[in-house]
Image (spheres, rainbow, N blue to C red):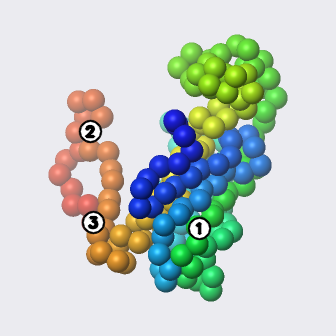
Amino acid sequence: VVGSSIGHNLVLTSFGESHGKCVGAVLDGCPAGLELQEKDIQKMLDLRRPGQSLVSTQRKEGDIVEILSGVFRGYTTGAPITTIIWNKDHDSKSYDKLRTAMRPGHSDYPAFVKYKKFNDHRGGGRFSGRLTATHVMGGAIARKLLKVTLGIETNAYTCQIGKIKMKNQATSQM
């Protein structure tokens, strides 16, 4: 993460840390009048929620989205849309020793250097996989905007890992 914002027409700014009070996103550039409810975003967050398999983090978070601004009476207002999810399942004690002992393959050292020793080292801080939730929140809104305004539908899936390939399958079956 070079900065906290990405985009041109729609600008997504993420905030928060893995072991902070919450993580969130501000999406600026969404026009007024898009019908939007928390359930539209929640549906996508549920797909990335941690603790659902043995190959993902075992951290148990409900990842319940709250829309704080930019939506009134179920429609976007044209103002920036702020969404958050509260961090509830985090035990920071085990990270105290990592303040100066950097984990190989993690962002501990680059964060230490970039933020001049003032980085939040707990759980990877700003560089944790937890921050992917902020992109999912912004992406869920952008996805709905594309579908409603331009009729564009988006799908993503893994079709190959190494030499293992998925057989041809219609995206409607996924």
Residue found at the far top of this picture: 101
Tag 3 and tag 2, C-beta contact below 8 Å: no
Q: Dot 1: few (<14), some (14–19), or many (≥20) neighbours within 10 Å?
A: many
Question: Which quarter of the figure has residue 78?
Answer: bottom right
Q: Which mark is residue 172?
A: 3
Identify the element where label 2 is drawn.
strand
Closer to the chain start, of discs 3 and 1, is 1
Residue kind at label 1, given as amino acid type: Ile
Residue found at the far front of this picture: 8
> Horizontal placement of 164 versus 131: left or right?
left
Residue 163, placed above or below residue 14: above
Q: Residue at x 53, y 20 (%)?
A: 105
Q: CA distance from mark 3 to mark 2?
A: 18 Å
Question: Which quarter of the figure has residue 148?
Answer: bottom left
Where is residue 126? Give x, y as percent.
63, 37
Q: CA distance from mark 3 to mark 1?
A: 30 Å
Whether residue 49 is visible, yes or no, is no
Residue found at the far left of this picture: 168
Whether residue 131 is visible, yes or no, is yes
> Horizontal placement of 53 versus 61: left or right?
left
The residue that disc 1 covers is 81
Residue 133, placed above or below residue 117: below
Where is residue 11? Give x, y as percent.
49, 57
The residue that disc 2 covers is 160
Q: Residue at x 72, y 55 (%)?
A: 86
Residue kind at label 3, given as amino acid type: Ser
> Horizontal placement of 67 versus 140: left or right?
right
Q: Residue at x 62, y 25 (%)?
A: 114
Closest to the camera, between mark 3 and mark 1, is 1
Where is residue 17? Give x, y as percent.
68, 42
Q: Dot 3: few (<14), some (14–19), or many (≥20) neighbours within 10 Å?
A: few
Identify the element where label 1 is drawn.
strand
